[in-house]
Amino acid sequence: MARLTNKHILLGVSGGIAAYKSADTARRLRDAGAEVRVIMTRAATEFITPLTMQAVSGHPVYQELLDTNAEAGMGHIELARWADVILVAPASANFLARLAQGRADDLLSTVCLATEATVAVAPAMNQQMWSNAATQTNLATIKKNGVKIFGPAEGSQACGEVGPGRMLEATELVTLTAALFSSGELDGLHIVITAGPTWEALDPVRGITNRSSGKMGYAIAAAAMEAGARVILVSGPTALADPERVQTIRVQSAQEMHDAVHAHIHNAQIFIGVAAVADYRPAQVSAEKIKKQNADMALKLMRNPDILASVAALAAAPYTVGFAAETNALEEHARRKLESKKIDLIAANYVGDDQGFEAEENSLLLIDRENIIKLPTQAKTKLARALIQQIAQRYRAKYGAKIHRLRS
Ligand code: C5P
């Protein structure tokens, strides 16, 4: 079954008899793991009630552009930003015309205009209206503007006629929506990713760790999987569930993380070190809980292996990507790490206060030997997809036709 885990799908419902199927579409999108919010046009509410759509989506339905209550909550621009995909199903002939014109005089058309997300439409109308030259011209225009067209199917219609114009079934819409997230950019590649903190035990109950939540690394693993890669995620202790269709190996210490990475790196083409690995571990681990004695106490620490540098130093090193979490002089520190660890690309971000580790949003500065670009502040899931896109481009530029494919 198609998966849409944690994807934000904004379901637009315009006015047409096929709107009765929208409740099923919302439910199936949620069954596939998506979070669904619904916008209805005024005409849509003549065919299915907002209460029904609220019940199946689990959120109040957005209806009016100039609604002070709604704007005080998630306003229309926020809604446009929130969406990973806007799916308009059904899309009436009138809505397609409005989308083609770039109208912004109701909520749904405005949000479609204000979003950077992919907009997909599932047309539903009488076959004559579908075949009309005006509709076909509008369709060509929105296609040229990057809108995805799902369907329509052919068959018997609510009006009694037979022909093209029937909206696709909910299950087909879910499959097509999920396919929008499978870029295929890393098709057949094998990727190893580290994530989370490490835990360096002092005794059976105490240890040294850090504030890494693992969110960024897990999001990158999910994005790499969606881009077609076979992903092994080596994770330190986190509260997160294993990402779907990602082989997750749980470890505690830096040494264990190092060993797990090296056990799996031999047939990987890309390594991404996202983990906040402890630089030092206690020189001795007490078998029993350490008792308090003197007023002060000294801990002797020793260096942990640098996992990223050790992978980059392999004779057949994969394309290596590191992270630099800094509290100051971001670019300077990141460049130094790129050189000292001899890696291909470094993703740098500020940490501390409310930025970085536990936050839902992040931004990244991507630095390699050729250039430097900034991925602006956005949800970690979106940022992860943008990063994977950048890595795929650079990997292709470096290895071109020599890309080794595990699956053909
Ligand atoms: O040197 P620093 O810890 O700041 O470098 C950060 C980068 O190096 C991250 O990509 C991190 O995953 C990786 N690293 C590692 N092993 C270590 C320390 C850091 O893989 N022992």
Image (tube, grey):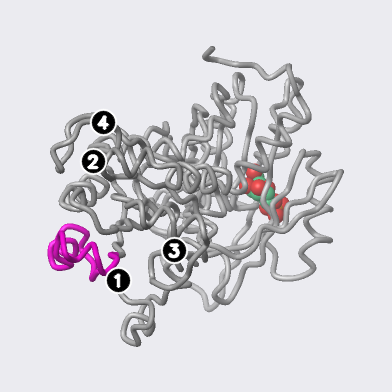
- Which tag, 1 or 4, sits closer to the chain's start? 1
Residue at image coords 34%, 83%? 67
Please state which amino acid type lies under the numbered disc 3.
Answer: Trp
**For the residues carrying marks 3 and 4, which lies nearer the camera in this image?**
4
* Numbered range of the magenta stretch: 40-61
Q: Residue furthest top?
A: 408
- Which tag, 3 or 4, sits closer to the chain's start? 3
- Which tag, 2 or 1, sits closer to the chain's start? 1
Residue at image coords 43%, 59%? 83
Residue labelled with disc 1: 62
**Secondary element type, mark 1:** loop
Residue 303 at least partly seen? no
Mark carried by residue 163? 4
* Image coordinates for residue 347, horizontal then vertical, percent: 69, 52
Query: Ligand 1 closer than 8 Å to the CB at disc 1?
Result: no
Please state which amino acid type lies under the numbered disc 4.
Answer: Gly
Horizontal relation, residue 278 to residue 26: left or right: right
Please state which amino acid type lies under the numbered disc 1.
Answer: Tyr
**For the residues carrying marks 1 and 4, which lies nearer the camera in this image?**
4
- Which tag, 1 or 3, sits closer to the chain's start? 1
Residue at image coords 30%, 71%? 62
Horizontal relation, residue 236 to residue 406: left or right: left
In which quadrant of the rendered image does the C terminus lie? top right
* Image coordinates for residue 236, horizontal then vertical, percent: 47, 46
**Secondary element type, mark 3:** helix
**For the residues carrying marks 2 and 3, which lies nearer the camera in this image?**
2
Residue labelled with disc 2: 170
Q: Is residue 59 magenta?
A: yes
Mark carried by residue 82? 3
C-alpha separation, residue under disc 4 versus residue under disc 2: 19 Å
Residue 176 at least partly seen? yes
